[in-house]
Image (cartoon, rainbow, N blue to C red):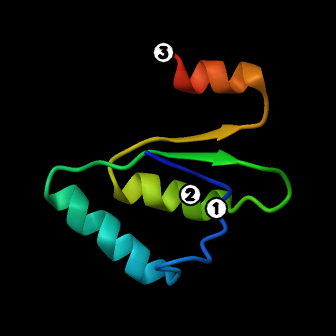
Amino acid sequence: MMLTDGDFNVGISDVDEMLDLVKANRDRGISLSTVGFGRGNLNDHMMEQMADNGNGNYSYIDSLTEAKKSLWR
């Protein structure tokens, strides 16, 4: 699970490199779900791509109610 604002600026930051890493791990049986936090600076598209390529889910948290729905199932 990745919790982030979607602003990838530390470590691997190239989109293709990140997606290749996610796909390689997916092929090894490791899925990736992403949870986006923040306002105005959130990269929804990237977060969805990572979750889709990682056979996971994407959620966006903008309130305590949404956090409970997404994280406490």
The answer to whether the residues at label 1 and label 3 have Cβ atoms under 8 Å apart is no
The answer to whether the residues at label 2 and label 1 have Cβ atoms under 8 Å apart is yes
Residue 9: quarter of image: bottom right
Above or below for 26 versus 18 = above
Q: Residues within 10 Å of mark 3 (few under 14, many from 20)?
A: few
At x 33% / y 64%, what residue is drawn?
22
Identify which residue, 4 or 32, lies in the foreground. 4
The mark nearer the N terminus, 1 or 3, is: 1
At x 23% / y 50%, what residue is drawn?
30
At x 37% / y 50%, what residue is drawn?
32
Give the residue at mark 3.
73
Q: Nearer the viewer, mark 2 or mark 1?
A: 1
Give the residue at mark 1.
6
Give the residue at mark 2.
47
Could you say whether the residue bearing mark 2 is in a helix, strand or loop? helix
The mark nearer the N terminus, 3 or 2, is: 2
At x 54% / y 25%, what residue is drawn?
71
Q: Which mark is residue 16?
A: none
Residue 52 at x, y percent in the picture: 41, 53
Residue 64: quarter of image: top right
Above or below for 15 versus 32 = below
Dot 3 amino acid type: Arg
Q: Residue furthest left?
A: 28
Q: Which quadrant, please, contains the N terminus?
A: top left
Residue 56 at x, y percent in the picture: 38, 44
Question: Does 4 sit left or right of 52 as displayed?
Answer: right
Q: Residues within 10 Å of mark 1 (few under 14, many from 20)?
A: some
Dot 1 amino acid type: Gly
Could you say whether the residue bearing mark 3 is in a helix, strand or loop? loop
Q: Residue furthest right?
A: 40
Dot 2 amino acid type: Met
Could you say whether the residue bearing mark 1 is in a helix, strand or loop? loop
